[in-house]
Amino acid sequence: MVKTFIMEADLINPTATEENQTTEETTMVKVNDADDGKFEIESSSSADVKPLEVESGDADTSASPSPTETDNDGHKNDTYPTGQSPRFGGLADMVDASLRSIQSAGSAIVHAFTKINAEPGAPFAVTSSDLSDLSSERTHTALARVLEKAAKNLPPCVPEEEESLKNVRVQIEALVRRIGVEEEDDHARDHEHYKSDAHKHDMDMAANALATVVLRSKPEEGITNEQSDMDFRREVFGTNAIADKKLDSFLKLCWDAVKDFVLIMLILLGIIGIAVETTLGLEEGEECGACWIEGAAILAAVLIVVLVTATIDYQKQFAFVRLTRSLHETNTKVVIRNGHQVSVIDDDIVVGDILSVNSHSLASIPADCVVLGPPVSGGLRMDESSLTGESALITKHPGDVVLSGTTAVQGSAKLVVIAVGTASVAGKIKAQVYESAEHDGEGLDGDEESPLFTKLEKIAKQIGLAGSAAALLSLVVNCIKGFAFGDENPKDVLIEYIVVAITVLAVAVPEGLPLAVTLALAFSSNKMMKEQNLVKHLDACETMGCATTICTDKTGTLTANKMTARAVYTNGTDFSCTDPAVSLGDFVKQSSDRPSQSTLDLISTLIAVDTMDETTLEIDTGGNVKSTSGNPTEVALLVLACSLGNNYQDIRQSTRGRTDKGELSEFLVEGKQIGFSSARKMMSWAVPRLEGGYRIYSKGASEVLIARCSHQLMKSSDGNYDEAAEINDDSRQDILGMGEVYARRGMRTLALAYRDLPDGVDFDAKSDSVLNADGSEALEVETDLTFVSLVGIEDPLRPEVPGAIVLCYEAGIDVRLVTGDSPNTAVSIAYQAGVLKDFHFTGNADEKIATNLKPNVLMEGKVFRRKVYRIDDDGNKEFDQTAFDKIWPHLRVLARSSPDDKLTLAHGLNQSTLFTDMSACRKLKKEDNIDVFPDRQVVAMTGDGTNDAPALKRADIGFAMGIAGTQIAKDAADIILLDDNFASIVTAAKWGRNVYASIQKFLQFQLTVNIAAVVTALVGSFAYAKSPLAAIQLLWVNLLMDALASLALASEPPTDALLKRDPVNRSKNIITRRMWGNMLGQATYQLVVIMFILFAGPEVFGLKPGHEVEREDNENSTHYTFIFNTFVWMQLFNEINSRSLEGDCNVFRGIHK
């Protein structure tokens, strides 16, 4: 295969004068790609390719060492044949010159642009949308398209530089052709051309061309620090400062509170009451005096309720703001501007900035970027779990896209910023959270109100209708009595009848209900805060109590987001620890067939020596690990060494050739490090032995290391020491088979081995028979190894998760795992957590792998999308609820999912009406023993990553992690788990159900008051055309007494019995039959007492009837005051009765708690 490279030699020296600038001829370079992977260079040119003299910083000529340059340890680097460069390996210097040529040409264009930029409005060759598409696609083909468009759209230069501009276009077009069309399937990265040196170097050049030519930046100098330049870039490409979610103003919160149906009725009553009493209700010549007091009192009650509700909501907003403000102020990054490194906050970063990233600071990437060359040994390794949910580290090379919100874990690199703010991937998700009106998730909208408030709204309307009917009945009856059977003058008494009817209606309306509900929710939310649940929206307290499904993320939610060794195979024995509360080291040491102490010490020494210094543990005086940093896999190994009873730092400092501290530091140069590379898939470190020679410790991919082992460490016959036995085919297969078992459990496997080397060994010698993973010759010293151990590493479950999920199932809450991990990893975690049970599997029950699951129990994201979306007649993608309903009752694990899959799942579950199809429900029960909840699902979604935000917002209740969660996820969530503990969700469910029960208790108390009061008012109006209970008296009862009653009932702590019940149906009336029986029974008792006092009281107690006193004397009546006090005392005792919803005889049970 022949590849053609077009290069420009000595295009333009930007430091030269216009008179001495020259343009050389084009050099055509043909690279013959031979079968052996080597390259032959053929050059055809009429001009020699000369070294370029470029302005300092224009070309990265010092990034790679010279062939004889030494490393930090004083050892010479590998030498290179004449005509080759360390940067480009097998390619000729002319390819290196090609890169420098592009950079030089880019510098010339930038030099030309400085003239153009003097005039305002100088355009860029690409738009923000083009760069945003590049960050979204993240493919090399997308980068090629951007460069291709840039080549066509480069703005014109002054005439003297037109030839340079033309040459730049030629070079970019040739580069685009060489990159070619990348395969779009999942195996694109395995393509031979993709992995070739030529393609890697092309991507190196493409990344630098993007920075230099397209974005007018320089890898070594960055952009200018002039404010005008940065302002222009913000104008063209946008700002990185995504506006924080606006806090609702106090007035808006007041407006939201006043929309309550009960409050609207009270406002109307107050206005009508004031209008009637101050106008129609006055006789000729009569002064109003305090006639307006009852109407004004009703309006004052409304004002109190609104202010209290709005104040509580306002304070909740600021509690969340205080939680996040400190984080924002510390988000600073290092960028290069004008050749100097400067620290700026994330908001000030612009497109074209050169970002310096290294793993030591675990830098979180603030914008979408492209990695610049030259490539660094080992590459930049990124943790993308916050966006993808996949905890595996991703290696980035020049030309690769690095997304905002991800974290650099290993290595260092320079990145050029390509998309900021809402143009970046994370920014789009944040916009979807903050600006749902513009980013509505493709129409996947749902209910705005919680189940509780939907039910309360319904009750309020029913009470309003009942009260209106009672008021109308009072008016009609009084009119019939007064006009048909009496001799009353209609003009004199009609207004009085209307006032009485309004009083009946006012008595019927539970004025204290909105305030009582708000206070109950606020009290419960404060209690939940103490139990690590920060409630952002008050109604979320109760909604969680109604949850029927939890769709949970894996990384950081079910798992600790911390790689941990969970299995080790050594001496022919497997030690797999399945209890997440027990460390692997303790498990091994406590096993009856534990390895010898010498084996355990050898494993610890191998780990301590053959890990990087950047990976560290902070260990307290008790030997416990307090914190970690560095490569997560190496952290897991070091923790294993510590749990085996060895301090890795002590081992390093006592090993000659490994430590740079203490007495042995002067012998560090005697050690030989062979760093990790993707080509070898292993890492080694050789240290001198006291008896002479070296011992080389190696760790790496299990399949690679095991193939290089000729011996394995076995326990001696008496078990007191170890001996190296020759490995046979059966032993090798046993080790490889155990590696497969670990992999099926969702673990990553690493092999540990060593070899003793003689004095004078050649560390650079190549093996004649063993090849590296990429097909190149292996180092001789890394062959003929002795196998020590196979280690299985996983991101473990949080210890409390299995128990929490058991409680969820007991409470009738289904748990579904949604993750970006592979199917087997997802199945392993789901089975350990208890999301999957044995009955979900078919075939061999011992093989808990994806292929053994029943249909639709596990589904990959791409299959899920294909099944639940259909294409309509217009070619648009449309959600298919019917197809979704065939899947979700079986679905327990969704693997390799995208952010949209979580959103789709939350929406589909929420909108499903499968429960109405009784035949389908019976079939599911009969064939699969699946019970479908008899109502629409109430969906809870947990997550900590940016990718979880849209689904958190769409779900009925969204949980975000307070420690590991991204800011976007926290903004979208309803509840924040302050301790990142999945078990806290059970606490939230328990408190949610307690809130629901507390509100039921309050309604039982409140409606008993209203039933008794309305009947009393009606009877009084029928008998005397006057209510014994005034509206202002009932207002006092409802507003003050009921508010305190609601707090008293809400303050009762939740009990474990609450989690033994099924969730409450969305459509189920909040007032149960038993509650109706309790209320009617208690109201009947109260009415009997009130009627006795009303009709027999004057004679029994020697009082003048109240209606006569108020009508004849126009004074307050002792009789009616007696009735009111009796009524109040009965309500106080009824509050104790209201503690019981189930009709318990002992209403005092638990009152002391």
Image: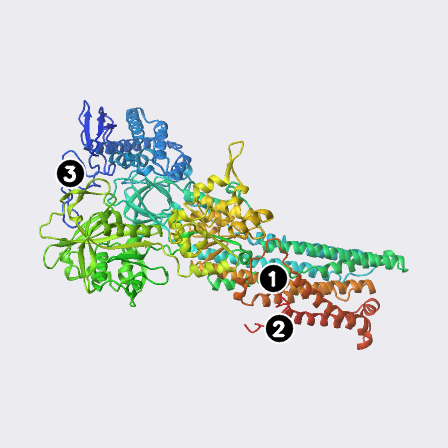
Seen in the image, is 276 located left or right of residue 22? Answer: right
Which residue was labeled with disc 2? Answer: 1146
Classify 23 as above or below 327. above
What's the CA distance linking mark 1 and mark 2?
20 Å
Q: Which residue is mark 3?
A: 80
- The picture quadrant where one finds residue 336 is top left
Q: CA distance from mark 3 to mark 2?
A: 91 Å
- Tell me which label, 1 or 3, sits earlier in the chain: 3
> Of marks 3 and 2, which one's residue comes earlier in the chain?
3
Residue extending furthest right?
Answer: 487
Q: Residue at x 65, y 65 (%)?
A: 1005
Percent of width and height locating residue 1115? 79, 69
Point out residue 176 in the picture as x, y percentages from the top left corner: 32, 30
Q: Secondary structure at mark 2?
A: loop
Q: Disc 1 marks which amino acid?
A: Ile
Residue occupying the far top of the picture: 46
Pointer 3 local density, CA inside 10 Å: few below 14, some 14–19, many at least 20: some
How many numbered markers are drawn?
Answer: 3
Left or right? Give the position of 547 relative to 600.
right
Q: Quadrant of the N terminus?
A: top left
Residue, disc 1: 999
